[in-house]
Image (cartoon, helix red, strand yellow):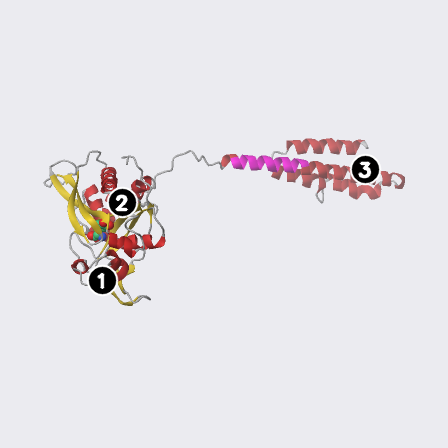
Amino acid sequence: MSDDLQLLRTETEAALAAAADLRALDAVRVAVLGKSGSLSGLLKGLGQVPAEQRKERGAALNRLKAEIEALLEVRRSALEEAELDARLKAERVDVTLPPRPFAPGTAADGGIHPISRTIEELTAIFGAMGFRVVEGPDIESDWHNFGALNIPDHHPARQDHDTFYMPGTDPNGHRRVLRTQTSPLQIRTMLAEPPPIRIIAPGRTYRADHDATHSPMFHQVEGLVIDRGITLGHLKGCLVDFLRAFFGIADLPVRFRASYFPFTEPSMEVDIGWNRRTGELGGGGDWLEILGSGMVHPKVLANCGLDPREWQGFAFGMGIERITMLKHGMPDLRPFYECDLRWLKHYAADPLAPASLHEGV
Ligand code: DAH
């Protein structure tokens, strides 16, 4: 290789090594191989080279061109890789950082509605006891809502519930109603799956009733356990554990009081201890009714095709707004549905603090 080509090669190599980024690299390419680049100039000057040297010189120039192109490529991929590395390093997300709380006043400044929060808590507590969540339709047949639950046609309970009847009937000729309770989920679950069964069913319920403590739409949660050898002892243990975990009071007094529901036998209402004067839960010597429960009535089991001699169970149901109001000391039911931002901001739960079992089961 002649001296001038050797020099060009050395200079180009140095320039390539010095190119710190892709832009600098491209400048080197233009300076050497571009239209008026140094190597292009030499190629153009071939015509002036004496004829006997031209062939050899031409071949040498082309070899050098190919070499420089290869060197350019090597340097380009090295620089590209370095640039990608640098970008990945700069854009790295530290997944171990705690999330930032949402800035107040921004669109993301949200919270969990207290009803949703209570449902999350119910799910966490009963989930830890092996219960599953099931859901059913808000528009029920009166057979699921009443008949199968041993509430016959002219039973006063149908009036007590101030039922909203819908026009028309379902395909089986049953009247359609807005469910007055979540208890139809007992029927639907027993018809849909064989025991053992352990479910809770939170959801909306409807009754024609409206005042400070009643709303035409409200929420209940139903519970159902079906297995062999289930006794009142299981019911009591389960509900005492639940109430103490939900209210976060380890020694919350709980009382079981004989009562009547058409779908349980025996039936019990469950009271918790509180102070009527201060509204404080726990001590105080007064009792507050909180939920209905009982051993599933043999007729209800039979209505669902289960032999009451083989299968027993217990059921319970309670108002979600009611236990939420008691837990948080809320005096009035109506703000739950009024979308008043001041109330929502005050009572909403932090979406970044999921319901946990910190109070234990
Ligand atoms: N469904 C009843 C109501 O709305 C509550 C209830 C009582 C549910 C006793 C039950 C139960 O499962 O066993 O008043």
User: What residue is shown at x 22% (from left), y 39% (from top)?
Assistant: 240
Q: CA distance from mark 1 to mark 3?
A: 97 Å
Q: Is residue 157 left or right of residue 34?
A: left
Picture quadrant of residue 239:
top left
Q: Point out the frontmost of discs 3 and 2.
A: 2
Mark 3 or mark 2: name the one nearer the start of the chain. 3
SS at badge 2: helix
Amino acid marked by disc 1: Phe
Crowding at dot 1, Cα within 10 Å, few <14 / some 14-19 / many 20+, comes out as some
Mark 1 or mark 3: name the one nearer the start of the chain. 3
Q: CA distance from mark 2 to mark 1?
A: 26 Å
Magenta part of the chain: 74-88
Q: Is residue 252 left or right of residue 354?
A: left
Q: Considering only vertical position in the picture, is 321 above or below 10?
A: below
Q: Considering only vertical position in the picture, is 116 above or below 171?
A: above
SS at badge 1: loop
SS at badge 3: helix
Q: Which residue is mark 3?
A: 60
Q: Which residue is mark 1?
A: 164
Q: Which residue is mark 2?
A: 118
Identify the mark at residue 121; answer none if there is no mark. none
User: What residue is shown at x 21% (from left), y 60% (from top)?
Assistant: 152
Say whether residue 47 is visible. yes
Q: Is residue 67 left or right of residue 85?
A: right
Residue 171: image x %, image y %?
33, 66
